[in-house]
Image (cartoon, coloured by chain):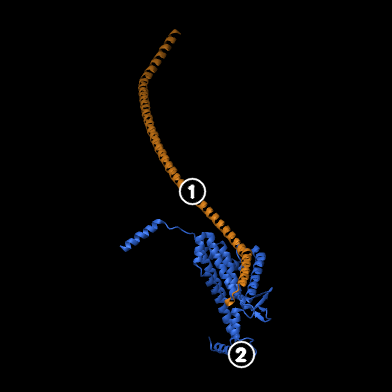
Chain colours: A orange, B blue
Amino acid sequence: MPLNIDWQQILLHLLNFVILFAGLWLLLYKPVRKFMNSRREHYEKMDADAEKKSAEAEEKRAEYEKKLAGADAEIDEKRSAARRELDGYETMRKQAAEEEADAILVAARESAAREKERAVAEARGEIAGLVTQATEKIVLRESASEAYDQFLDAAEKSEKKDGGDA
Amino acid sequence: MTKKQTILFISVVLAVCTVLIVGIVLTNGLYVRDTDIQESMQDAVLHEGDKIDLFGLMVNPGLISAYIVTGVILLFAAIVRIFVIPRFKRIPGKFQLVLEEAVGMFDNMAKTNSPHRNNFLGAYIFAAAAYIFIGTLFELVGFPWVSAAGKSVTLPAPLSDINGAIALGCLSYLVILAGGIVTNRARGLGRTLKEFSLPISMSFRLFGALLSGLLVSELVYSYLSLSFVLPVVVGVLFTVLHALVQAYVLATLTALIYGEVCEPYVKKTKGRSKEKKTRKTEVTV
C-alpha cells in the first residue's frame, strides 16, 4: 500500500484505542462525571430547599403583614369604637351631671323655698310670740300692779276682819 | 534599568553566547550520522527501515508508542480511580479540579454540540483528546526501542504513524455514523454519508499536523549547529501546541458533526411552503 498504509496495523490501532476508550470511560470519565452530577444535584437540592424555605418565609411574611394590616385596622376600629364609646359615656356623664345639677338645683330651690317658708313661718310665729309676749307684758304689767293692789287690799281686809273677830 | 545593571546584563549575554559558541565548536566532530537527512525523514514518514517485531508481526514504531501511551493512560486512570476518586470532596482540591475541568470540558462540549444525544459522545471525545494530547507529548520523552533490524529507534507520537491517524479518523467517522443511524435511522445514515470526506480529512489532518512536528524535529536534530536553544522553541511549537490544537480540533469536529447528524428531523409545515410560494409569485409579479 502507498504511504505504508497497513490494514492490519490500522486494526491494531483501533483495538488499542477501543481498549483505551473503554478503560477511560469506566475508570475516569464515568466516576468523575457521576461525582460531579451528584454534587450538582446536591447543590440543586440545597438551592431548591432554600428557595422553598424562602418562598415559605415570604408567604409567612405576607401572611403576617396581612395580619398586621388587619391588626392595624382592628386597632383603629377598636380605637374609634372606644372613642365613640368614650364620647357616648362623656355625653351620658355630662347629661347625667346636668340632670343631677338640675335636680340639685330644683331640690335646692325647693329646699330654699321650704326654708324660706319655714323661716317666714317661724319669723311670723316668733313675731307673733313676741307681739304676744309684748302684749302680755304690757297687759301683765298693768294687771300685776292691780292684782298686787287687790292682794294688798284683800290682805288688809282679811286682817281687819280677823282683828275684828278676835 | 541603571547603568550598572545594563553592563551586568550585557556581560551575562556575552558570556552565554561565548559558552555556546565554544560548545558548538568543540562538539562539531562528535555527531556522526549513520544515514543522511533524506533517509531519516523518509523513515519518519514511511517507517520502512525501522519496523519493530511485535509477537511476530512487523509493525511501525508508532503502534508500540500507541500501546505504551494507552498503558500509561490506563495505569494513571486506574490509580486515580482507586486512590483519588473515592476521596473526592465537594470543595475540590487542585488535582480534583484538574480532573473535573477535563471531564467537564468534554462533557459540556458534547452537550453543547449535540444536545439530543451526548452521553457516549462526551466519553469518546474525552478519550480521543486524551489519546492525542498525551500521545503527542510522548514524542518529547524520546523513548528508545530496538527495531527488527537491531537498530535503536526513538518512539514517535502514535498519530505520526499514518495507520494510527487513519484508525482514529475512521473511528470518529464510525462513531458519528452510528450516532446518526441510532438517532435518525436512514436519514442519519444519509446525513453521515453526505460527509464522506470526513474520515480522510480527519485522518490526514492528524497525520499531517503531527508528522510536520516530527519532520521539523528530525531536521533540527540532524544538524548539530541547530541543536542549541532551537529545539526548545521547536519542541513547544510543534509538539505541545500541536498536542493541544489537534486534540481540540478532533474533539470539536467530531462533536459538531455528531450533533448535526443526531439532530432530530423536524418536518416542514405546509403553511410555510405555501407562504414561500406566495412570496415567490409576488416577487415574479
Which numbered circle lies on residue B256? none
Q: Are marks 1 and 2 in contact (CB under 8 Å)?
A: no
Element carrying mark 2: helix
Q: Amino acid at mark 2?
A: Ile
Name which residue lies at 46% across and 48% down.
Answer: A66
- Local crowd size for mark 2, using a 10 Å CA cut-off: few (<14), some (14–19), many (≥20): some
- Local crowd size for mark 1, using a 10 Å CA cut-off: few (<14), some (14–19), many (≥20): few
Element carrying mark 1: helix
Q: Quadrant of residue A150?
A: top left
Question: Where does the image place residue B197, in percent across and percent down from the top left?
Answer: 51, 70
Which numbered circle lies on residue A63? 1
Chain of the residue where label 2 is placed in the rendered structure: B
Residue sitting nearer the eye, B123 or A33: B123
Which numbered circle lies on residue B24? 2
Residue sitting nearer the eye, B45 or A70: B45
Residue sitting nearer the eye, B58 or A120: B58
Question: Where does the image place residue A90, in percent across and percent down from the top left?
Answer: 41, 39
Q: Amino acid at mark 1?
A: Glu
Chain of the residue where label 1 is placed in the rendered structure: A
Asked whether residue B260 is in view, the answer is no
Name which residue lies at 42% across and 14% down.
Answer: A155
